[in-house]
Image (cartoon, helix red, strand yellow):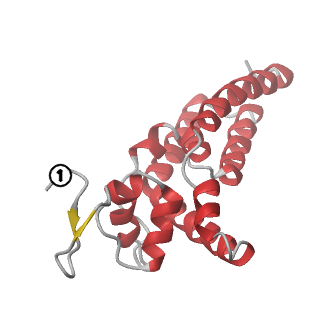
Amino acid sequence: MNEQQEYAPSNNQKTDSPFPPVLNLDDQRQAVFVGKKYETYYQEKFNQITPKKQMAGFNIGAFFFGLMWLFYRKMYGYGLILLGLILVSCVIPIPEAIDRGISIALAVTMGMFGNTLYKNFVEKKIKEIERSHPDSIEQELERQGGTNIWAGIGILFVAVIAIYIVVTISGNY
């Protein structure tokens, strides 16, 4: 058996998919939307999230690169909210210890709940795509999903410039 052949668990038939078999339509659509990391990371995490259990592991990427991770995963609205919080924290004069505490709390929260936030985002986007593009769902999932490395890198530069401007204007340097 070569690397790209897998056995489907239900009937032991070989498939030529490079990914493990997906069991239902929701998983299939999530796999298309999320991309390569779905089967190796997100599928397990998403399945752990229930209404009673909102935390599924610790997302290291979201912890260390919160703002960049949000934009990389195309969660632009959440990313803009986080950028706004960061900019507000630059304007409000607060003691350095409290500022660091807030930064650490935001990072830990992103790490703890990043997978849940992403799952909710994915489910919402899939429903929107199913409603608005019923004839081309797969293509729209691929187009609107996945990742955007340039958005992640770009927001870093935008954030640095915005923080510099805000700090310079407010005089909190």
Q: Nearer the viewer, residue 125 or 58?
A: 125
Residue type at mark 1 is Asn
**Against 70, is 51 above or below?**
below
How many labels sit on residues?
A: 1
Q: Residues within 10 Å of mark 1 (few under 14, many from 20)?
A: few
Q: Residue 132 at x, y = what percent?
A: 74, 73
- Residue shown at 42% from the left, 77% from the top: 50
> As drawn, is 157 to the left or to the right of 51?
right
- Residue shown at 60% from the left, 30% from the top: 153
Q: Residue 4 at x, y = what percent?
A: 25, 54
Q: Nearer the viewer, residue 25 or 44?
A: 25
**Position of the N terminus by quadrant:** bottom left
> As drawn, is 121 to the left or to the right of 13?
right
> As drawn, is 165 to the left or to the right of 36?
right
- Residue shown at 51% from the left, 46% from the top: 105
Q: Nearer the viewer, residue 77 or 99?
A: 77
Element assignment for label 1: loop
**Against 16, is 91 above or below?**
above
List the residue tagged with mark 1. 2
Q: Quadrant of residue 85?
A: top right
Q: Nearer the viewer, residue 114 or 36?
A: 36
Q: Residue 152 at x, y = what percent?
A: 60, 36
Q: Quadrant of residue 120?
A: bottom right
Q: Residue 161 at x, y = what percent?
A: 74, 23
The outermost residue toward the right is 169
- Residue shown at 45% from the left, 70% from the top: 28
**Position of the C terminus by quadrant:** top right
